[in-house]
Amino acid sequence: MEISKGVEMLHLDFHGNIIHPVLLWDREMAVLIDTGFPGQIEDLRVAMEKAGVPLDKLKAVILTHQDMDHIGSLPEILQECGNHVKIYAHELDKPYIQGELPLLKDGHLENPPKGRVDDCLVDGQELAFCGGILVIHTPGHTPGHISLYLKQSKILVAGDSMYSVDGILGGIHAPTTPDMTAARLSLKKYIHLDIASVVCYHGGLSDENVHDQVVELIQG
């Protein structure tokens, strides 16, 4: 689903679990935000090709955090794209993504997905990709969770800092958020942004009265 020019919200089904990585592209490059579950490389390839973006145009992968449904297909992407793609994440989640520490929520897995992180992102950093991407450190769900504000389209890619149901923001998903205090503080970082729409990894697009919805969540 193309939600703005050069911004596609992917719709991937993993055994009935629907997730929404985001694909950005322009003439120079394509950027993928999160990679789905392990084994979804072909789903990603098909979804990207439907958007008219071949996998070999991918130059950057930004990981919002370390959870398995976000880094799952990273090993396959690295295997296929090699050094043509750069991987970005926050430094606090980097050791988990690289396999130096067991995943916080999937530490029991014998063979968890892992891959290199080339560049560590910090709060307030701006990436000059596809019209500009503002990095917002939004811990709570994981220590190194980040959200991404797409400046050109005014879209907030919220990762798992919030979820949505039928276009309505549902707030923080408490069962998968170890630090609810930090997560609530993180939501306050959205207040001063001019947000036209939000993509939640779980739940998808919310694009009506987004600012009012966020304010309500914070006050609630």
Image (cartoon, rainbow, N blue to C red):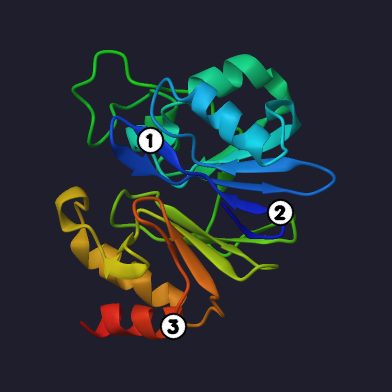
15 and 177: which is toward the camera = 15
Q: In the rendered structure, which disc, 3 or 2, sits on the residue that comes first in sequence?
A: 2
Q: Which residue is mark 2?
A: 6
Label 3: which secondary element: loop
Q: Is residue 93 above or below residue 26?
A: above
- Locate the C terminus by quadrant: bottom left
Q: How far is disc 3 from disc 2 in space, using C-alphas?
A: 23 Å
Image x and y of residue 34, in percent: 49, 40
219 and 196: which is toward the camera = 196
Residue ID at (37%, 77%): 188
Q: Are marks 3 and 2 in contact (CB under 8 Å)?
A: no
Q: How far is disc 1 from disc 2 in space, using C-alphas?
A: 22 Å
Q: Amino acid at mark 1?
A: Asp
Image x and y of residue 149, in percent: 57, 64
Say if residue 181 shows up in the picture. yes
Which mark is nearer the camera, 3 or 1? 1
Q: Amino acid at mark 3?
A: Asn
Determine the image quadrant of residue 62.
top right
Q: Which residue is mark 3?
A: 209
Q: Is residue 168 above or below residue 31?
A: below
Q: Amino acid at mark 2?
A: Gly
Instruction: Left or right? Give the position of 83 relative to 218.
Output: right
Q: Which residue is mark 1?
A: 13
Image x and y of residue 88, in percent: 57, 41
Q: In the rendered structure, which disc, 1 or 2, sits on the residue that comes first in sequence?
A: 2
